[in-house]
Image (cartoon, grey):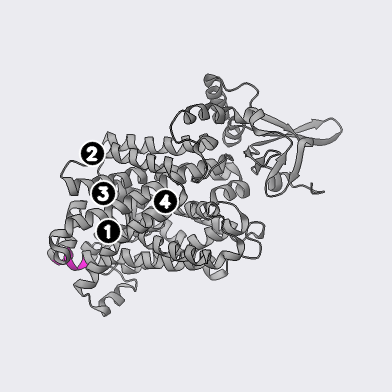
Amino acid sequence: MSAIVDLVLGVVTSIGGFVEVGSISTSAQAGSEFGFQLLWAVAAATVMLAMLAEMSGRLAAVGKQSVAGAVRERFGIHFQAVPLVAELIIDVLLLTAEIGGVAIAVKLLTGIAFQWWLLPIGVVVWLVLWVSGFAVVEYGLGLLGLVTLAFIVAAWKLGPDVSDLAKGLVPTMADHDMTRYAFLAVSILGATVSPYLVNFYSSGTIEEKMKEQELWVNRVTSYAGISFGGVVAMGVLVTSAMVLEPRSILVNSYEQATLMFVPTFGRWAVALFAFSLGIGCLGAALEITLNAGYVLAQVFGWEWGANKPRRDEARFTTAFTFILVLALAIGLIGFDPLKLTMICVALTVVIMPLIVLPFLVLMNDSRYVKGHTSGPIGNGFLAALTILAGLLALVVVPLEILGG
Amino acid sequence: MPSRVDLIRDVLDKGVVDRHGREMGRVDSIVIALRPNRPPQVTAIEIGPAVLAYRVRPVLGRLMSAVEHALGIDQGRPLRIPFGDILGIHSHIKVDRAFGETVAATVEQRLRAWVSALPGSS
């Protein structure tokens, strides 16, 4: 019975926790600039995330190791230092962007400039982590995040042509602005497969004390929950494509993205968009902050866990607090949340090979996963997509930046 | 203890727990004594950020030592545990020590004093 409850909660909260600042901004921009043409990128990124989440849960359930801890043990600190630092830098920037996303959402509801909300939101994030266990972070915000289903409702009500949607799921070349198209494809991948998620899933599996016999729960939760979550991200893209693209409205700010809800929800559009953005980003901010504590504690061998008293794991608590303060400091210096998000998600793809490829080696090492090693199809798909996307990112990210 | 140990695979960078199962850190370094006309002898494992940083880059190790000195937490660090005090090598390395009684706990105890002062920490 407990496994069934875990399964249902896991699937539902994966849906609610999928959409955040990165997926909203990349999907909204993709839809407004290229219609349905980049749906395939959302689908590919979703499959990739589901596979990685399943694998990290499997590593944790069988090997009782998180990804960060296992990489340190298997490859040593000399190898891990560079990807670790790169991941932490991106996590801090992404955390700033997520807090910015919540602040923009509050601004949409109150009209008060988003900068004024950064510090209070940072305090809320810290307080939630201080007083709550893992279940509140994972399930509480995931359930509230079901408000993001509004994107699917909006897309459904707009009545897209099914054959056009199907065409979007097949990769094609763009008929205009190929660099921008490739940049958005790379960004969608980076927004969906954030490095923090891989370690967060494995740490969460350890927190929940999942056993080897419950691997089927992990498999169903990963594939079903994340696939449904991917449908929400597709809802963002489709809504944007049907509302913003015909009117030539480009998503240069979150305020413009709000317009995609107007035809469907009328006077509730702003509030609904703000709640979707705010709750999605708050959930992601909590996960990134907690994961920063997880990563540092696991790499250095400290006590960790969201369910333990904070005084019993002072270094873990201090670590996530420090990362949160750092992200807030960057936010308070001044930034454009949308631009920062796009930089983060593009850079994520550049460092992705450093994160994913060692992880694939771990998942084929029977010392960590016993007989549950990954198959050749999964290995090949993930390795090929990671390397291709990394190479593409190395080309298009500088071009996009140079092109303004 | 296994009869044959691969130091890099089975010991270096592995998690260390004390005799009560509490996490103490990871094996940040291994001490090997060179002996004339005899094979080198593994004498101890070390836990501490300075030796870990030294492995990445010697300059980082010196920097970390300076930071520890400036914070007044360099006394007795890194923690050196003789190889003979290793109780077992499994998924973790279990050592015959109590975490709270070693210098590996110095930073944890200092931070705990601050964390404990906040309401809701326990």
Q: In this view, does A304 lie to the left or right of A10?
A: right
Q: Where is residue A174 in the image (x, y as percent from the top left)?
A: 27, 67
The quarter of the picture where residue B49 lies is top right
**Three-letter code, disc 4:** Val
Q: Where is residue B4 in the image (x, y as percent from the top left)?
A: 80, 48
Q: Residue A115 carries which label?
A: 2
- Visible residue check, residue A146: yes
Q: Which of marks 4 and 3 is nearer the N terminus?
A: 4
Q: Earlier in the sequence, mark 2 or mark 4?
A: 2
Q: Which of marks 1 and 4 is nearer the N terminus?
A: 4
Q: Which mark is residue A338?
A: 3
Instruction: Report the Cα–Cα distance between label 1 and label 2.
Output: 29 Å
Q: Residue A136 carries which label?
A: 4
Q: What element carries label 3?
A: helix
Q: Which of marks 1 and 3 is nearer the N terminus?
A: 1
**Three-letter code, disc 2:** Gln
Image depth: mark 3 or mark 2 in front: 2
Counting every numbered tag in the picture gives 4
Comparing B14 with A383, the one in front is B14
